[in-house]
Image (spheres, helix red, strand yellow):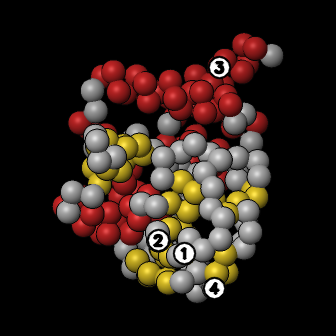
Amino acid sequence: MIYFHGSPIGNIKTLQPNVSNHKEAFVYFSSNRSVALLYTVRKNWYPYGFSGENRIVEYTEYYPNALADIYAKKTGYVYEYDGEGIIENPTNIYCAYVSRLPVSTTNEEVIEDVLLEILKLEKQGLMIIKKYEDLSEEEHKAKSKMILREIEDENLVEKNNDYARFVQEKFPSEWEVALNEKVQGD
């Protein structure tokens, strides 16, 4: 089986384990190239899931024009790994696998414009894009609750990093609610 790893960095011959939100050092892979493609741009923001029996990747825009905002005119790299050695799935995320050891890549695919590649996969039926303006009122409410939970869980109002600034800029209403709750809680 071929596994895929998305990165904004090119010419990597050996992928090194890194600590991510799972608190352990892993090299992350997906058995689904579409998923790896999303990770070629680093934003700590990957609002996707899987749809239907075939588990097609479904990307949801959480703010207007989010897909283009994040992926347009960005170069990304999808690395392949032949799966030799132990690959496990401690995250319990569908199609996600990890290696605890460094991994030599077997192929590097350069994606000149990640957005164009995503749109190509959508036309081929390999991805679904849920546009912000097409979300139902219930989906918007659920999105807002999820963002508030993320701000709280990650204590973003206390941080001054790229991810906190991204959430503050893209979700000002939720950010304001979180700030008010923080002030009232102090």
Numbered marks: total: 4
The picture places residue 46, in percent across and down from the top left corner, at 49, 49
Residue drawn where x is 72% and y is 34% of the image: 155
What residue did someone put label 2 on?
Answer: 2
What residue did someone put label 4 on?
Answer: 13
User: 100 or 182: which is nearer to us?
Assistant: 100
Is 81 left, or right, of 160 in this rendering? left
Instruction: Tell whether label 3 touches label 1 (CB within 8 Å).
Output: no
User: 96 or 110: which is nearer to us?
Assistant: 96
3D distance between C-alphas at marks 1 and 2: 6 Å
The reply to whether residue 64 is visible in this rendering is no
Foreground label between 1 and 4 = 1
Foreground label between 2 and 3 = 2
3D distance between C-alphas at marks 2 and 3: 48 Å
Residue drawn where x is 20% and y is 63% of the image: 124
Is 116 left, or right, of 156 in this rendering? left
Is 90 left, or right, of 50 in this rendering? right
**Circle 3: residue type:** Asn
3D distance between C-alphas at marks 1 and 3: 47 Å
Mark 2 nearby-residue class (10 Å; few <14, some 14–19, many ≥20): some
SS under mark 3: helix
The numbered disc on residue 56 is: none
Q: Quadrant of the C terminus?
A: top right
The picture places residue 105, in percent across and down from the top left corner, at 58, 81
What residue did someone put label 3 on?
Answer: 180
